[in-house]
Amino acid sequence: MNFQKRKQKILAELDKQGEVDIKKLATDLAISEITARRDLNQLAADGLLYRTHGGAVKVNPNEKPYTFANKTAQNAAVKDAICRVAASQIQDGDIIFMDCGSTVFRLCQFIKNKKIKVITNSLPVIYELQDSTVSLNIIGGELDAERQAVHGTTANEHIAKYRATKAFLGVDGISINGLFANSEKEAGITTAFATHSAYTYMLCDAAKIGKETYLNFAGLNLISAVVTNASADKLVGFEEQGVALLFAKS
C-alpha cells in the first residue's frame, strides 16, 4: 500500500475516532511502526493532523494550528541530519543538558542506547528516553503547557546545581552579533544550561543562521560550537569568535 492510500485511511480513521495510535495503525495497515510514525509526521507537517506521544489527533480548526509535536515534524530530515552529527559528539559517561527545542528533541532517537545522563526541562525528551539506557533528571519549575517544558527562576536555580560535560541547545536566532530569543524565560534557561556546561553545542537549521529576533541575550562567547546545515558563507566570523562549526549534510 503506497503513502497516498495510507494517508486516506489514516485521515478516515481520524474523522471517525478523533485519534489514532501508532501501534494499532501499524497493525491495521500491515506496516511497521517506523513507517506509521513517518506517515504521521508527514501528515502533521502538512497540517492535516496533530502529533501526540504515541499517535495523533484530529485537527480542530478552532484551536491554534501549532503544537510542539507539529514543530518537531517540520523539516524533519534536516533536523535529523543535524542531530546525527550532534550524537556523534556524545560518548558513554557524558552528562548532558538538553533543552526543549524541537531540533534538540529529535536527538533522542540517536542516543537511546548510550550510557549517559540527560538533564532536561523538556517533557517530550523525558517521555522519549524513559525506556532507554539513558539516565534521566528532569528540571523542576513552572510548566509551560504550550512548549511542554519547565521554565522560570526555580528551573534556572535547579540547573545551577549541576555540571554537564556537554549541552545541546536550540535558539530562535543566531548571528555574528550573538544569540537571540523570543522571550526572557527562554533566554534565561538557555543561559543557565550553557553557563553550567563544559562545552555547549547550538543545533540550528539554516533558517536560524543570521536571524535576529526580539531579545539579544548573549554573545557568541556563551557557546562552543554550532551544528547546522547552513552553508559556510552564512557563518563568516563565527570561528574568529571561537565558535567551532560542524556541518550536517541534509
Image (cartoon, rainbow, N blue to C red):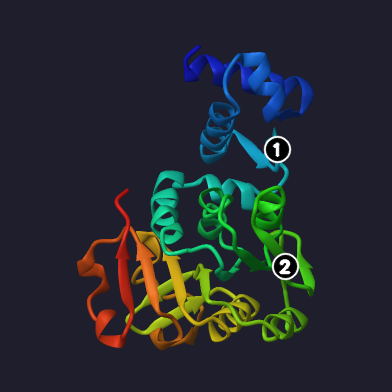
Identify residue type, mark 1.
Answer: Gly
- Where is residue 110 drawn, in percent x and y? 51, 50
Image coordinates of residue 204 in percent, x first then y, are 42, 64
Residue at 41%, 58% in the rendered image = 88
- In the rendered image, is residue 66 in sight? no
Q: For this rendering, which residue is in front, 158 or 79?
A: 158
Q: What element carries label 1?
A: loop
Which residue is under mark 2? 137
Q: Is residue 204 above or below residue 124?
A: below
Residue situated in front as seen by the camera: 230 or 213: 230
- 1 and 2 marks in contact (CB < 8 Å): no
Q: How crowded is mark 2: few (under 14 residues within 10 Å), some or many (20 or more)?
A: few
At label 2, the amino acid type is: Asn
Q: Is residue 209 above or below residue 104?
A: below
Label ID, residue 54: 1
Question: Position of 45 compared to 150: left or right?
Answer: left
Looking at marks 1 and 2 on the same chain, the residue that comes earlier in the sequence is marked by 1
